Each structure stands twice: as structure tokens, then as C-alpha cells.
């Protein structure tokens, strides 16, 4: 696939030109973030992912624009209907890209999508993202269950590689306690992963290993029974849960990105990390 990583100019259809990730959007009087503020804060990241999903930069811009409108529309609909928790803004817009690409593939613009994405969209893995919430990827469910500010902090630090202090300041946390704050949020994410995993277990063998799995991922340097690892080797569900619950290693960014956006997660993560290394106030 061509590399479209160079900055674009404004496409002339009302979409902004690409810049760096801006400050978090301010709130309007009714508590809803304005569309303009959301574009300013998240357009560049959304356009990055949309570009990976398509065959040309122009189609990437079209996909990103449609996905942005869709994300705002669906969020305001949820607020009007009084629905429950939602994803933080940036993961929400990235999942909107995937949903919009699914519509393109099914109805009209499939030829504009990356061929590898088109193949993925027909797979069992992709079907999990369209399943009822309890059957969706564990990381997606856990991130949605966090308070929005906590989820935003986790995503911006772990996936977008922004400095903990900068993100804490942006989201209204005390920067002096930024390291403790992200540690608290990681622990909260892990707790929700563990709880969601246990709540959806139906296999008796998996249930029998639930406490051992919790202990092994909580203290990974401690010895664990050999039969636990044998179980993980043959059980994808528990293996996925172990990856999500072990949040102190280097795997959390991949777990979050893969669990939330699905296809292209490692490409998106690599691109965002490369951008972060060139920007001030970020962690390489």
C-alpha cells in the first residue's frame, strides 16, 4: 500500500488540514463538545487511520470526514436518548472509521478500501466488533466502562505516546501527580478487564482458572502452575484476557489499539509513535 504519511493540505470540502493532536475540546453550555473543537483536537489522528484504511489520500479524507460526522451524530443521539457510557472521543472516532468502512464495503465504495481491510471485514475477528457488547473484544469493553476522562488519559498516554504530564494538564489533572494518576487509570482498566472476563465466562474449565489467571497477571514474576499455561495455550479467550490484564509490561498500547479499532492497529500505532517522536512534549 502506498505510504501517505506526509501532511496534507485542506481538501477544500470543509475538512481541516492535518496538524498535530491539539488540546482537548472545550465544552459547550449544554455539556457537549462543539464539532469545531472536536475537529481541531482529533482530526489528524482520525485522518491517519482513515488513510491506512483506503487506497488513496483523497479517499482517506472522504472516509475520515464521513466517520467524523457519524461519530458526532451517534454521540448526540446517545446523549438525547440517555444511553450509558461511551468511549472517549478519539477511540470513538477511530471506531467510527471502522464502522463507516464496513458500510462502504457492504454498499458502495468497497473498491476504495485497502484490499487487506476488505478481506478482514469478512472475517470472524471483524464480526466480534459488531457483536453485542458482552461478546466484543475485552479491551474495547473495559475502555468503554472507564470514566471518559480516565479512558482519554489512558489512550493519549499509551497509544498516542503523549507525555503523562502534558495529558494530565490537558485533562485537568494535577501534573505533579501525573505518574500516580496514570498508574491509577491502568489499574482501573485492568480491574475492568478482569471483571468483564469473569462475567462472560461460560466454560467450566475457564472458570476454574479465573482466579489463577488474575493472580498470574497481577504478579507476573511469581511462579504460576504449569497447567494454567497449558490452558492458555489452547484457550484463546483466556489468552486474550491475560494480555489485557497484564498492564505493567509493554503490551498495553497494542492491546488497546487492537481491541478498539481492530484492523490496522499495529500500523496506526507505529504511525502515531513516529509522529510523537517528532513532536514536543511526548514520550517516544
Image (cartoon, helix red, strand yellow):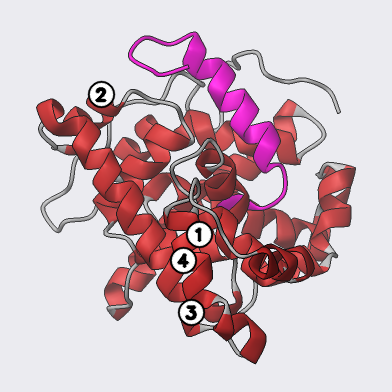
Q: Quick one: 98 or 269, which is closer to the camera?
A: 269
Q: Is residue 262 above or below residue 49?
A: below
Q: Quadrant of the N terminus?
A: top right
Residue drawn at x 23%, y 24% is 165
The mark closer to the camera, 2 or 1, is 1
- Does dot 1 land on a helix, a strand or a loop? helix
Precedes in sequence: disc 4 or disc 2: 2
The mark closer to the camera, 3 or 4, is 4
The residue carrying mark 4 is: 214
Q: Quick one: 42 or 172, which is closer to the camera?
A: 172
Q: Give the side of residue 72 with respect to residue 13, left or right.
A: left
Marks 1 and 4 sit apart, C-alpha to C-alpha, by 6 Å
Where's residue 190, x and y in %?
40, 58
- The label shown at residue 166 is 2
Q: Which residues are magenta?
A: 260-284
Residue drawn at x 44%, y 27% is 161
Marks 3 and 1 sit apart, C-alpha to C-alpha, by 15 Å
The residue carrying mark 1 is: 216
Q: Is residue 35 visible?
A: no
The residue carrying mark 3 is: 198
Q: Is residue 108 visible?
A: yes
Amino acid at each position: 500500500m502506498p505510504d501517505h504519511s506526509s501532511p496534507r493540505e485542506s481538501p477544500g470540502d470543509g475538512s481541516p488540514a492535518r496538524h498535530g493532536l491539539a488540546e482537548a475540546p472545550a465544552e459547550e453550555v449544554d455539556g457537549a463538545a462543539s464539532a469545531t473543537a472536536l475537529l481541531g483536537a482529533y482530526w489528524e489522528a482520525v485522518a491517519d487511520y482513515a488513510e491506512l484504511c483506503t487506497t488513496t489520500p483523497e479517499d482517506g479524507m472522504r472516509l475520515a470526514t464521513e466517520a467524523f460526522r457519524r461519530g458526532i451524530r451517534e454521540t448526540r443521539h446517545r446523549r438525547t436518548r440517555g444511553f450509558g457510557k461511551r468511549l472517549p472521543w478519539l477511540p470513538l472516532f477511530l471506531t467510527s472509521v471502522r464502522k463507516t468502512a464496513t458500510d462502504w464495503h457492504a454498499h458502495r465504495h468497497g473498491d476504495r478500501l485497502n484490499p487487506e481491510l476488505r478481506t478482514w471485514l469478512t472475517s470472524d475477528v471483524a464480526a466480534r466488533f459488531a457483536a453485542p457488547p458482552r461478546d466484543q473484544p475485552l479491551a474495547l469493553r473495559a475502555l468503554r466502562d472507564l470514566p471518559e476522562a480516565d479512558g482519554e488519559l489512558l489512550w493519549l498516554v499509551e497509544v498516542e505516546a503523549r507525555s503523562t504530564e502534558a495529558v494530565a494538564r490537558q485533562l485537568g489533572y494535577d501534573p505533579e501527580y501525573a505518574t500516580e494518576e496514570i498508574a491509577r487509570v491502568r489499574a482501573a482498566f485492568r480491574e475492568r478487564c478482569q471483571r468483564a472476563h469473569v462475567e462472560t465466562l461460560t466454560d467450566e474449565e475457564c472458570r476454574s482458572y479465573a482466579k489463577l489467571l488474575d493472580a498470574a497477571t497481577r504478579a507476573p514474576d511469581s511462579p504460576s502452575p504449569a497447567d494454567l499455561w497449558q490452558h492458555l495455550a489452547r484457550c484463546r479467550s483466556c489468552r486474550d484476557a491475560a494480555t489485557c490484564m497484564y498492564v505493567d509490561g509493554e503490551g498495553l498500547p497494542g492491546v488497546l489499539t487492537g481491541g478498539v479499532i481492530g484492523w490496522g492497529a499495529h500500523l496506526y500505532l507505529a504511525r502515531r509513535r513516529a509522529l510523537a517522536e517528532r513532536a514536543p512534549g511526548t514520550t517516544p
